Amino acid sequence: MTHAPAVPSRFSRRLLGALLLASAFHVSTLPAQEPAEPPAKEVSEKVSEEFAKLRPLIEAKNFAEALKLIDNVLSELKTETYDFVLLAQMKSQILLTTGEMNKATAPLEESLTIAQRYNFLPPTAYYEQFYLLSQIYYQQAAESKNADTQKTAFAKSYEYLKKALPLAPKPTVDLQLFAASLLYNQASLGGAPDPEKFRQAITEARKGLY
């Protein structure tokens, strides 16, 4: 039986606030143009103006209008830009806040791919977002009654956890417990238990105990 740790809303709100804060810095005063190689790590003047409209919507919890505004701006942006990364991550966080977990993964994954390509974010941001994706996929697996869906979601969860672990600022009991639980559920899935996964789960649990 799987037990899904709910994706922490506190965590999502903190990331959303951080994204809004990031949008206030590194504002470019140059007109929109074809991005340089690599693209600049700054928010364009045009998108900065849109952030000014977005903040009161989020503070008022008018998430439907906030998402509509973000989608309109995203449709006009080139994907290989810092603007796109920030807005796609913000869209993901709003979807998590409104409980639309299954819709939240795609914009977050796309933004992380671009962010890594151009080193847009600090290591702690990658850790938090890889860990968040791992939690989301874990919860999807735990809530599904379809064995194939569970297998795929647990595999995705573990894929992102492996990316998150080396970036963790410091080991925590919660992180090791999550890793052990994920490996245990993977080992238990299906008709044939996986002894290697069980051994890995024990290793992660021991790290938590220490």
Image (tube, rainbow, N blue to C red):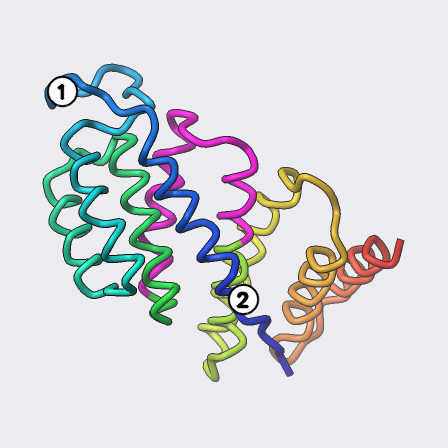
Residue 57, position as x, y percentages in the image:
23, 57
Residue type at mark 1: give it. Glu
Residue 125, position as x, y percentages in the image:
50, 39
Position of 54 with respect to 182 (left or right) is: left
Position of 205 with respect to 14 (left or right) is: right
In the picture, which quadrant includes the N terminus?
Answer: bottom right
- Judge by depth and name the residue closer to the eye, 140 or 29: 29
Quick one: which residue is furthest to the right in this view?
A: 210
Q: Are there few (<14), some (14-19), or many (20+) residues within 10 Å of tag 1?
A: few
**Mark 1 element type:** loop
- Judge by depth and name the residue closer to the eye, 45 or 206: 45
Q: Are there few (<14), some (14-19), or many (20+) residues within 10 Å of tag 2?
A: many
Real-space CA distance between mark 1 and mark 2, rounded to the nearest whole angstrom? 39 Å
Q: Mark 2 points at which residue?
A: 138
Q: Tell me which secondary structure the magenta stretch mostly adopts.
A: helix
What residue is shown at x 40% (from left), y 41% (from top)?
Answer: 112
Query: Which of the 4 image quadrants contains residue 118?
Result: top left
Q: Mark 1 points at which residue?
A: 34
Query: Above or below — where is 77 with respect to 184?
Result: above
- Judge by depth and name the residue closer to the eye, 183 or 193: 183
Question: Which region of the structure is painted magenta?
Answer: 103-131
What residue is shown at x 54% (from left), y 66% (from top)?
Answer: 138
The mark that comes first in sequence, 1 or 2, is 1
What residue is shown at x 51% (from left), y 72% (from top)?
Answer: 141
Q: Is label 1 or label 2 in front? A: 1
Query: Above or below — where is 99 with respect to 67?
Result: below
What residue is shown at x 62% (from left), y 38% (from top)?
Answer: 167
Position of 169 with respect to 86 (left or right) is: right
Residue 114 belongs to the span the image colors magenta: yes
Give yes or no for contact between labels 1 and 2 (Cβ–Cβ under 8 Å).
Answer: no
**Mark 2 element type:** helix
Query: Above or below — where is 56 with respect to 198?
Result: above
